[in-house]
Image (cartoon, rainbow, N blue to C red):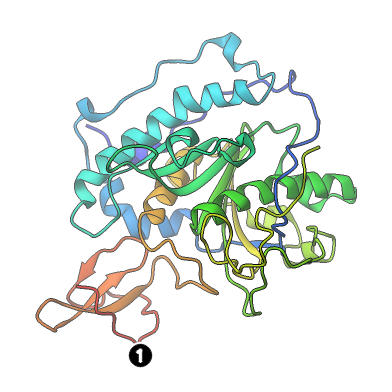
Amino acid sequence: MRTLLHYLTTPNPEVRREGLRAGPNTFPVGDYDIEGVEPWLDFSYETIMDCFGDILTTPVDDDLFNDPPPIAAHDLNLTDESSVTFILTKRHHTIIDCALQIAQDQLKDRGFGFPISWSLGSRSHVQEDPRLRPDWAVTNHSGKPPYEDLGPGDTKQSKKWNTSMKDSRDEHMREEFEKALRQVHLYSIRVNCRSCFLISDLELVWLRRRKSPEPARPLSTSRPRRLVSQENSRRVTSITSVLSGTSSMSLDSSGSPYTDGGNPDINEGPFEMCVVPWSNHGVGNLTINLAMFAAALWAATDNSVRESYPPLASWERIRGPSGEILYRQVGSLKIASTLPPDAILSQPEQISDAL
C-alpha cells in the first residue's frame, strides 16, 4: 500500500528542451486587461496538507493506482507545444485524474461539486472559434458533455512563455508574458470561474481572479490596456518571490455590463499567482501533480469571484441542521463540532446557514 501524497510527489520526467524555439504567443481575443500580478500566498504545500493531509496520508490499496508507463527517450526531446502536451497527457493527466478519483470516494459527503476530473478543454463548453477553447479544463462531468468548466487552462512551451518574462526589462517580453495571462483570463470570464492556469515543461502557474473595489464598466467601454509593466511588477519584486495577429475586438459591443457568455463584467483586480517548478519533487515539496490535485478540489467548492478570500486553511462558523453552531474549513469543507486547536477562524462575527 502507498499514499496519494507519495503518488503525487514523484519526480517529473527529465525532458530535453534543446529543440524548443522562441516565438510569439497567441494574440488573445477581447479587451480583457491584466491589472497586475501578486503572489497567491496560501497556495502552498502547508495549506494543502492542512486541508487534505488526512486524505493524502491514508494508505491506499495499490490496485487503485494507475501508474503511467515510462515515456520513451525520444519523446522526451521537446520540439513544440504539442510535444509538451503529449507528456502532460501520458503522465500528469493519468496521475492527477487517478488521484482525484480516489480522493472523491473519501470526500463525497463533504459538499464538493463532484464528480470532477482534469479533462481536455474540448470536453467543456465547446466553442467554434478555436481561440475560445482552452487546452485543459477542470470539469464537473455529471450529465452529458459539454461539461461545466471549473478551471480552464492552456499548455505552453517554455521558450515561448515562462514566468521569468514578467520581470524582463524588454517590453516585448513582458507583452508576451501578458498574452498568455489574458488568454486564460478570457476563458475564466466566459465560464464565470475563479481560477485558471498555465502549464508548461518548466512550471505550473495557477491564477486566481479578484474583483476590484472600483465600479465595473461595460466591456465595450474603451479602456487603456495595462501591461504587466515595470510599475505593476513592483507588486511582486521578482518572480522568485511567488515560487513554492488576431483581432483584439471586444467580445461584446452592446454596451451591456455582461459578456456574451452572460457573466458580469466585473472590474478585475490583480491576479494572485502561484508558480510550481517542474523540478519540484518528493514529500514535503509542492509538486505540479499535487498542486493540480488541490486546485481541482478547490475549484469544486465556492468558485465565485470576490474582492478577497479567507485563507483556504481557515475555518468558518456554520449553522447545523438542528440550529447548532459547527465549524467548516474553507478549503476542505471538513466539519467539526469545535474549533480545532490553533485553527484560524475567518469572519468570527458571521454564521452561515450552510447545513
> In the image, is residue 161 above or below residue 235?
above
**Residue found at the very far front of the displayed protein:** 254
Q: Is residue 277 visible?
A: no
Q: Residues within 10 Å of mark 1 (few under 14, many from 20)?
A: few
Label 1: which secondary element: loop
On the image, the x and y values in percent for residue 152 come to 51, 45
On the image, the x and y values in percent for residue 234 come to 78, 66
**Residue found at the very far left of the displayed protein:** 322
> In the image, is residue 244 above or below residue 333?
above
> In the image, is residue 8 above or below residue 208?
above
Q: Quadrant of the N terminus?
A: top left
Residue at image point 24% right, 74% down: 354
Q: Quadrant of residue 277?
A: top right
Horizontally, residue 226 falls left or right of residue 156, namely right
On the image, the x and y values in percent for residue 190 come to 54, 53
Residue at image point 35% right, 86% down: 348
Which residue is disc 1 drawn over?
Answer: 349
Residue at image point 48% right, 49% down: 151
On the image, the x and y values in percent for residue 20 come to 74, 23
